[in-house]
Image (spheres, helix red, strand yellow):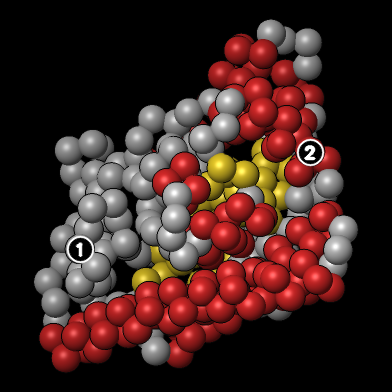
Amino acid sequence: MQNELIYPEEKIKNHFSYAFRIFGKLFSFAFFGIGSILLSILLLPAYKIIFRKKKAFSRQARKLLSFMFRFFIKIMTIINVARIKVFDKSGNEVKNKSDNPLCSLESCVIVANHPSLLDVVMIISQIPNADVIANAYLDRRNILTKIVHSLYITSNVPYEELVERCKESIGDGNVLIIFPEGTRSLPTGQNQFKKGAARIALAAGCPLVPIYIGGNDKIGLRKKDSLFLMNPNSCYKYNLFIKEKILIDDCAGLPEPIAAKRLMAKVKAALADENNVENRI
């Protein structure tokens, strides 16, 4: 598996269409950057004035960011850069927002595979109360720093503090998004899964909800890919497959290391590429 491409290499069939999608991708990234700046310097400060209590601000700001990400995806869909579909645990496509199980999730940990740069955007767009553990580099000065500081947990804090902040967020009803690989997947397969998500779920006493991100090849959004690459013959297709919840009750009474190992074995089975071949379409 690790020596073969997850998605077989394709040749470009229509160079004009490909060039248009590249242009659309560059436009989308510029649009995202401008939106992030406006959010940081205008909307978040305004929300802090309107919603003075910290929890009220966080709740409303997360809803705002989810809405903005949905709008961003809508723009990408219109210009044929990317589109998203959600599938419930029975494998049926969710057509209406009111039927979307992700919109009503509370106090749980979402674990997902990580094929591309836009994975967290796609998931947050569907979840109005999403929290994430942001990579430490986002804590440095860039256009996302203010957003991260205002809403999310950064990974560059001591482990005990990280767990406590995660527990507090989950206790407030938020959905914590974690990519167990810790980095974007390789074109030839997934990285080793880390146990952090299971440990946080055990500490918070909450279930894990696996989401497999399927669709087509995310070339151009993978780690170290050039920004000027694109899926050869299609827009980026994001199919979010919601799997069965993984409850921590089955590990009651077990030592934490053993319980975390068992939970992550279930996560791995739910998210492994080899177990989701039919979802890579």
Q: Is residue 81 visible?
A: no
**Residue at 49% of width from left, 48% of height from top?**
139
Along the horizontal axis of the image, is 210 left or right of 255?
A: left
State how far apart marks 2 and 1 are (Cα).
38 Å
Rendered residue at 76%/58% (across/down): 58
As drawn, 147 above or below 268: below
Tell me the element at label 1.
loop
Q: Where is residue 31? Give x, y as percent.
A: 43, 81
- Return the residue nearer the eye: 158 or 263: 158
User: x, y (%) of residue 100?
Assistant: 71, 67
Left or right placement of residue 50 versus residue 203 in this view: right
| Above or below 120: residue 42 | below
Q: Which mark is residue 226?
A: 1
Q: Which mark is residue 161?
A: none
Sequence-wise first label, 2 or 1: 2
Q: Residue at x 69, y 8 (%)?
A: 255
Q: Residue drawn at (65%, 23%), measured in percent from left and top? A: 160
Give the answer, above or below, for where 190 lies relative to 25. above
Amino acid residing under circle 2: Glu
Mark closer to the observer (2, 1): 2
Q: Within the image, what quadrant is residue 45 found in?
A: bottom right
Q: Locate residue 23: give its quadrant.
A: bottom left
- Residue 168 bears which disc, if any? 2
Residue 37 lies, in percent from the top left, at 51, 74
User: Could you say whether the residue bearing mark 2 is in a helix, strand or loop?
Assistant: helix
In the image, 73: left or right of 237? right
Instruction: Say few, some or many: other residues with alpha carbon within 10 Å of mark 1 (under 14 / 14 to 19 / 20 or more).
Output: few
Task: Assign the C terminus to one quadrant of the image.
Answer: bottom left
Are the residues flagged by discs 2 and 1 in contact, CB closer than 8 Å?
Answer: no
Where does residue 76 sit, x and y in percent of width and height?
Answer: 44, 82
Amino acid bearing label 1:
Ser
Residue 157 seen in the current view: yes
